[in-house]
């Protein structure tokens, strides 16, 4: 093992030999992955291939059984590391049920800034309103989440995740639970964050979107990375037979 260095070449996120099993079911089987700052990486693979577990592992919701996770060179998989402190540096959005139903949309967006990052309420709310305005939801700031459409809720969840300016944004199939006509508005927001330089790792089934927005595509199968390639190469000339079989399902 070489010691992690703080050189400019250090990836923002580095996974080495990450392994996670539930009982004797090995769900992540030696994952090596580097993500540079400002990179957008799409995680693709069949249901059950380990995408969500991988994202949960990066966010330290799941512990690793073996291997290391480095965030800017710091081994955050070390059990002595303050997991809440690491999570405060990472934004996460899941498929659904992201917003707290009993809090206003604005309180949802400002909660982490105020409680975790100790930003004064007035400042957090000014920023929160700015973010909500940027996605056309300023008028819903004082409303409760159930007044919003699914697409509006997901967009609010995404701006909530970036309100604290995390170093890394993890998106787990953020459009999978949406009615088809609401998918586009959420993908447009993700695209604008990607264009703005947000570092994103996103599990997705939206192949056209992955092709358009991701810099790299990582194909997981049974907890292993089968292929990790620039998006264009991944879709136009995949190296692995299993990748070709997987992509054929989307034709
Ligand atoms: P994906 O997101 O690619 O659909 P997941 O990471 O959700 O895949 O799941 C990968 C495998 O791990 C599945 O077989 C799933 O049943 C299993 N798994 C995930 N979480 C748990 C858990 N907490 N306990 C037992 N098995 C789990
Ligand atoms: Mg999943």
Image (cartoon, rainbow, N blue to C red):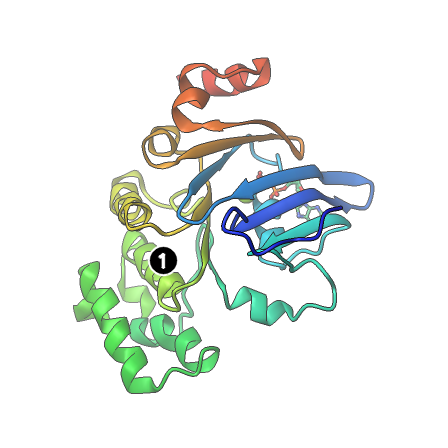
Q: In the image, residue 62 lies at what x, y percent?
A: 67, 56
Q: Which residue is mark 1?
A: 158
Q: Is residue 103 left or right of residue 59?
A: left
- The reply to whether residue 142 is in sight is no
140, above or below 38, in the image: below
Quarter placement of the C terminus: top left
Can residue 8 be seen here? The reply is yes
Left or right of 144 on screen, residue 65: right
Q: Quadrant of residue 19?
A: top right
For the residue pair 221 and 123, the one nearer the viewer reads as: 123
Viewer-proximal residue among 136 and 73: 73
User: Image point 76% across, 44% down: which residue?
Assistant: 21
| Helix, strand or loop for disc 1 | helix
Q: Residues within 10 Å of mark 1 (few under 14, many from 20)?
A: many
Q: Quadrant of ligand 2?
A: top right
Q: Is residue 223 left or right of residue 110?
A: right
């Amino acid at each position: 093992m070489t010691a992690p260095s703080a050189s400019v070449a250090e990836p923002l996120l580095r996974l080495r030999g990450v392994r996670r099993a539930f009982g004797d079911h090995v769900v992540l089987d030696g994952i090596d992955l580097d993500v540079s700052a400002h990179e957008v990486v799409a995680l693709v693979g069949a249901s059950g291939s380990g995408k969500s577990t991988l994202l949960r592992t990066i966010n330290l919701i799941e512990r690793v059984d073996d291997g290391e996770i480095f965030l800017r060179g710091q081994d955050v998989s070390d059990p002595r590391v303050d997991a809440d402190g690491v999570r405060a540096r990472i934004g996460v959005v899941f498929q659904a049920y992201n917003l707290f139903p009993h809090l206003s949309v604005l309180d949802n967006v400002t909660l982490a800034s105020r409680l975790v990052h100790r930003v004064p309420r007035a400042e957090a709310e000014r920023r929160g309103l700015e973010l909500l305005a940027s996605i056309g939801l300023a008028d819903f700031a004082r409303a409760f989440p159930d007044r919003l459409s699914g697409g509006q809720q997901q967009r609010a969840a995404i701006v909530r995740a970036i309100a604290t300016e995390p170093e890394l944004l993890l998106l787990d199939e953020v459009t999978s639970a949406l009615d088809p006509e609401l998918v586009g508005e959420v993908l447009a927001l993700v695209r604008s964050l990607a264009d703005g330089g947000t570092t994103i790792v996103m599990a997705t089934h939206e192949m056209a979107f992955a092709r358009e927005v991701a810099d790299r595509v990582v194909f997981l199968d049974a907890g292993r990375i089968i292929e990790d390639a620039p998006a264009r190469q991944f879709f136009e000339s995949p190296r692995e037979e299993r990748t070709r079989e997987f992509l054929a399902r989307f034709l």
